[in-house]
Amino acid sequence: MNSVNTIDFRTKKFRAGSFFFTGLTGLATILILAILATILTDVVYNGWGTLSWHFVSTIPKKDFFDSKTTGVLPMIIGTASRVFVMTLFVLPIGVITAIYLTEYAPNTSVITRIIRAAVNNLAGVPSIVFGLFGLGFFVNFVGKNLDVLFHHPTAVWGQPAIIWASLTLAVMTMPVVIVATEEALKAVPQGLREASLALGGTKLQTIIKIVLPQALPGILTGGILAVSRAAGEVAPILFTGVAYYMASLPQHLTDQFMDLGYHVFVLSTQSPNIQQTEPILYATVLVLLILTFALNLVAIFIRSNMRRKMRSLH
Amino acid sequence: MAEITLPKISPTELRPLAAGAGAPLIEITDLSLYYGASKALKNISLSLGEKVVTAFIGPSGCGKSTLLRCLNRMNDLIDNVRIEGAVTIGGHDINGANVDVIELRKRVGMVFQKSNPFPKSIYENVAYGLRLHGIKDKSTLDGVVEQSLRGAALWDEVKDRLHSSALGLSGGQQQRLCIARAIAIRPEIILMDEPASALDPIATTRIEELILELKKEFTIVIVTHNMQQAARISDYTAFFYIGELIEFDTTTRIFTNPSKRQTEDYVTGRFG
């Protein structure tokens, strides 16, 4: 009677390993959520009072440490425009690179492996290094030479500017876009490519008509990640375009700009009166979070629109 | 189905091919194919007739699909594939230096094992090949789409929802849509790689009936795992084993009186 076949399944057993692992994963999740909630609550609680229409629509005077008169309009415009210009560069270049890597490059070739390794390493470079690279390459090399080329008596291109900050950010976020696009392209079933080619489609026709439309939502996800990363970065723009103070809004790509992230740094380190500055600091952080969130929302909206269109067709 | 007349798709006039039903259209001469160092097809020689159905049978890994994909050069897509020997279609070497593989694939259509309709509407699936080749005229497209869907015995089931997604069709319908898409550009040869292997018996029967109908217009080469299917629909059968062509004869002979012991063992189910 005492054989293995008499094991009673009617009473649930306590399995310690399973119980603790479930608990562990749950705790990890709660921890992450708690940290996020603490930060958000702190920022919203302390920043909400200062946030007003006046605050987001005012160009501040040189002394921007007074919470009654200051504003962050130039910073909002600066951050939004550097992110926007970056997107214009990073998306096309990143997508084309990914198309080359997944659709054209022979998988086994040394060059492909070198490119992939380079992309992966690029993702691991500290952002301040990108800032220095941007200064050395874009501002001092490309910019200065453009000035020589166009015979500008004073520096027009050869100085920190929105364009150079955006390009530096584009280089920094390039791996994100490339990797996301590659994943999206790889997820397109090979059968669809074969079907198109078997109908006498060229490789280019197949990519444009079949592969890219399928991969578009995934590509946009890459774009969203790049925007999120870039919006909050300060180090890459330090030497390449951001200004401590500007009396007017930037007009050209060659202008310097004020930036929300950098402004947070300035407020927290340069203020003559910390108590007085603190509310502005919180409100500025809140605006930065809202702006990043809004940029994300726009991209997510475009993506879901696209998915819906793909599902319903026509 | 019989009176499909379509506008010319290719601006270049196609050269007339060998005339008369059953005349050799595809000549495979001493063809070997290597994946890297391993030889997947071993010195295969075979001639396939015009407007007949030829079946390739054999156990998994015997090279039948690989050989099929040599006929429209789909193996070009795979790295490290090397071919020796020749494949001619209508007397032209399809691996020749000047061959336009795009034009070749217009003349040699393909239906795949796993139905692979594009995530587009039914109409756009069928019109895709025509659009690729620059046909934009709405009434031409409408005509070809209808004729092709009728040709694939799908028209009556989908005529009221041409503009809804092809992905909403059943598996069997999707496969017939893929056939409609293939015949829309009027190939001479249709290659079918186990077109019914993922379908239920009823859908399979419909595909088989369709193949018998299509053979009036097209030369068909079909790879199949299903020996009853080969016996039902093909005129000629080639039996392959580990990259070699063991026997090629009329389907009747292969299934009733094969000359090789291996063939007999396989078709009677003793191995494979």
Image (cartoon, helix red, strand yellow):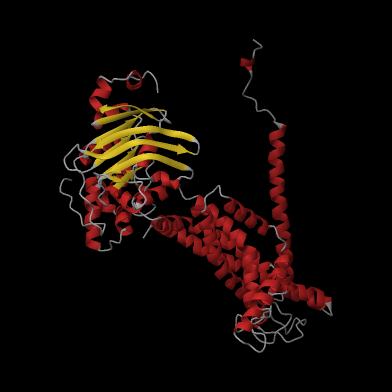
Q: State whether residue A33 is above or below residue B212.
A: below
Q: Quadrant of residue B60?
A: top left
Residue A312 or B239: which is nearer the viewer? Answer: B239
Q: Nearer the viewer, residue A50 or A227?
A: A227
Quadrant of the image occupied by residue A86: bottom right
- Residue lying at 26% horizontally and 27% vertically, measured from the top left: B249
* Residue farthest top in this picture: A1
Q: Residue at x 71, y 53 (%)?
A: A32
> In screen coordinates, is A52 left or right of B233?
right
Q: Quadrant of the N terminus of chain A?
A: top right
Vertical side of B250 occupied by B203: above or below: below
- For the C terminus of chain A, the image quarter is bottom left
For the image, the number of numbered tags is 0
A113 and B141: which one is in front?
A113
Q: Is residue B205 visible?
A: no
Residue A192 placed where, x, y %? Answer: 41, 49
